[in-house]
Image: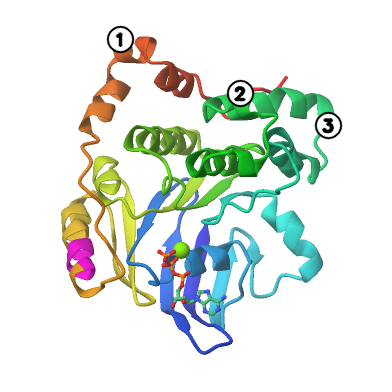
Amino acid sequence: MIQFTNVSKKYDNGTHALKDINLTIDKGEFVFVVGSSGAGKSTFLKLMMREEVPSTGSIIVDDTDLTKIKKREIPKFRRRLGIVFQDFRLIPNMTVFDNVAFAMRVIGTKEKKIRRRVPYVLSLMGLNEKARNYPQELSGGEQQRVALARALANNAEIIIADEPTGNVDPQMSYEIVDLLMRLNEAGTTVIMVTHEHSLVRCFDKRVIILDKGTVVSDGGALIREAATSHINAVSEISSEYVVPPEEDYSAYAQDRQSPDMQENSEPVEVMEDFNVTGGED
Ligand SMILES: Nc1ncnc2c1ncn2[C@@H]1O[C@H](COP(=O)(O)OP(=O)(O)OP(=O)(O)O)[C@@H](O)[C@H]1O
Ligand SMILES: [Mg+2]
């Protein structure tokens, strides 16, 4: 469970990024976080991974009070998280394989397990052929998928993903969210920032809308349409926010439902086989 109580965040330069946030995300929930550029989405995620600290209020993740946690306890806390940063944060002088392996090495995973698990998570992201490449040799979408593979490596209890589909095409976007849904069905809590409101509409989950640092809407399927129209309304008043072109995700949704399609479709079949312990002994 993630609990924000009266949380505000003012950066040192005076920017008031979040204002009085009160909400709870239960264990096993899937939550989309949307809102215009600068609304505070990344700040919201950075607070829950203890990359930033709130100016006021408290944040509790399961049994850990992030406003009281000691510095030396932070790495242990972060082991529970699989994080995809908006700017990827891949290590430039490490290969794709080692970037993913590194996440496992820092928590003391045995090399034997790393050698099984890394190719497995890379295969989920369609990246096996890039294992020996360095990040700068990859496209933006490929780098993003490495960041996602790294976030999946440790079977984290909570996945926190900041626009994990921002650089990939609609088919890949759909497959990534579909994969996150499967992880979620297996018990993982998923919090995902996205700008793609058609993706949000396609998957029937809770949507938190941030606008200028406050939660302006928070709800499930029933308010999805209202949420979407709010995004449109926000886009009209914010020149920075550009509504992405409408993508029709319904075709991919049919893929997911049809066993025939899954058999004939490589990526979807890989996703279908996905299980959280894959690649292990
Ligand atoms: N380290 C920082 N120092 C000062 N101000 C910051 C810092 N990080 C973010 N901000 C400001 O806080 C506000 C919220 O930023 P944040 O990155 O959370 O927005 P966002 O919703 O993730 O936007 P985007 O969709 O563009 O990624 C913005 O006004 C931003 O300029
Ligand atoms: Mg952001």
Q: Secondary structure at mark 2?
A: helix
Question: Label 1: which residue?
Answer: 260
Question: Label 3: which residue?
Answer: 110
Q: Residues within 10 Å of mark 3 (few under 14, many from 20)?
A: few
In the rendered view, how is the structure colored? rainbow
Lower position in the chain sequence, tag 2 or tag 3: 3
x and y percent of residue 242 in the render? 27, 61
Residue at 59% x, 87% y is 12
Check contact, mark 2 vs mark 3: CB within 8 A. no
Amino acid identity at mark 3: Lys
Q: Main secondary structure of the magenta part?
A: helix
- Measured in 3D between alpha carbons, the distance from the residue under mark 2 to the one under mark 1, in whole angstroms, is 27 Å
Q: From the Cβ of disc 1, is ligand 1 less than 8 Å away? A: no
Q: Is residue 179 above or below residue 215?
A: above
Residue at 54% x, 47% y is 159
Question: Label 2: which residue?
Answer: 129
Judge whether residue 133 can be spotted in this image.
Answer: yes
Judge whether residue 277 can be spotted in this image.
Answer: no
Q: Is residue 243 above or below residue 51?
A: above
Q: Residues within 10 Å of mark 1 (few under 14, many from 20)?
A: few
Residue at 69% x, 74% y is 68
Lower position in the chain sequence, tag 3 or tag 1: 3
Determine the image quadrant of residue 47: bottom right
- Decide if residue 230 is on the left or right side of residue 184: left
Q: Residues within 10 Å of mark 2 (few under 14, many from 20)?
A: few
Q: Which residues are magenta?
A: 230-235
